[in-house]
Image (tube, rainbow, N blue to C red):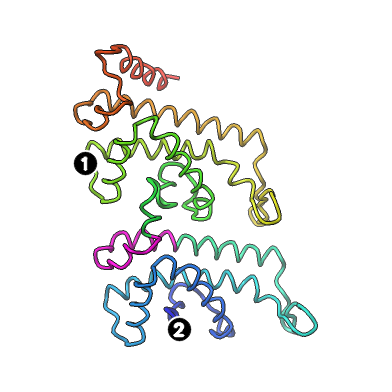
Amino acid sequence: MALVRNRGHIEGYLTIPNNLSFTALQSSVTFAEDNFAKKILGDALYNSLDEAITAETETDKQKALLYEVRKVIGYMAFSKYAMLGNAKVTDFGITAVHTQNEKPAFEWQVKDIVREAQEMAYKAVDDLLVYLEGVKADFSDWTAAPSFTEYQELFLPTAKMFSSCWHINNSRLTYLALVPKIRFVEEFYLDSLLCDTYVDELRTEFKNNSLTADNAKIMNLLQHYIARRTIENGIDALCVETSVFGLSRNYATNTVNSSRPADAEERERLVQRAAEEAELYKLKLIAVLYKNIDSYPTYKAGSCYVDPEVDSEYPDKKIKQFNSFLRT
């Protein structure tokens, strides 16, 4: 049972040296299938693709999906192999592979290759999720997979979408580090801003790709707001890693581009900028709601809405605050 069964299944987008056998990659391929492909596709869709490959009855739609899935498997498998293939395990312990004609790669070279392969792998994961969302009507089995629920859980469900609001270079790894903070922001900021009934309306329409024109305007502002609040609250998630060994600080070790960790002052400036921009988007969102309140009956009926007849200054103050914010 496998979606990648030979070199030809991954050679289209992953360069494999002629002297690297598929057998050598096999354990890494199995790891990638078990830990990524199966979890993303779900058992039902994974098994149906596997059966079609075995029977050689893949449809054009299945072939297109397999292309996206195999990118994930190929890059994940290569990143795993690259970490292990530079050494061999014998009865005498772990030794480096060294011949008369070849010597082991330097540590920084291996790290650069692994990092690039992982970035490509996680980008492929993002691409696969976006692709599945677009063809879910053709692959209904995916809608029963846990990854479908996870994909639809957030207002910023992919690295690409997050990057469209705040630049993270479309990095899936960066996005995954920020996901807990995205959940935090949606849980503790949105209800006080829009109230749960209107948030639920937006979430339902967003999940079903059925946003009204008016709600689409709010969603655009809301996504920018969430991204900035996430950076404001989550910058430490990118600097500190929690593991079984405790807390450690992440350092860029890529000697090619000589990256270095941002210092405390630089991080504080970034957090401050994110907070200021989040407030700007919040004020603009409120201004749009109040200027067009009859187009947002669910919000108007909620407790977050302040009736101008009760406090005639509230919406006007917010709009003026927004306008003054723009001038600063």
**Amino acid type assigned to the residue bearing label 1 in the image:** Thr
Range of magenta residues: 125-147
Q: Is residue 29 visible?
A: yes
The residue drawn where x is 51% and y is 72% is 32
Q: Quadrant of the N terminus?
A: bottom left
Q: Which residue in the protein does label 1 denote?
A: 212
The answer to which image quadrant residue 100 occupies is bottom right
Q: In which quarter of the image is the C terminus?
A: top left
Q: In this view, does 176 lie above or below 267?
A: below
Q: Position of residue 227 (x, y in %)?
A: 45, 40
The answer to which image quadrant residue 8 occupies is bottom left
Q: From this viewpoint, which residue is outermost toward the bottom?
A: 55
Position of 180 compared to 95: left or right?
left
Q: Does the magenta stretch include residue 145?
A: yes
The answer to which image quadrant residue 254 occupies is bottom right
The residue drawn where x is 64% and y is 41% is 262
Helix, strand or loop status at disc 2: loop
Q: Where is residue 281 in the image (x, y as percent from the top left)?
A: 39, 30
The answer to whether the residues at label 2 and label 1 have Cβ atoms under 8 Å apart is: no
The disc label shown at residue 5, or none:
2
The residue drawn where x is 50% and y is 30% is 275
Q: Is residue 76 above or below residue 220?
A: below
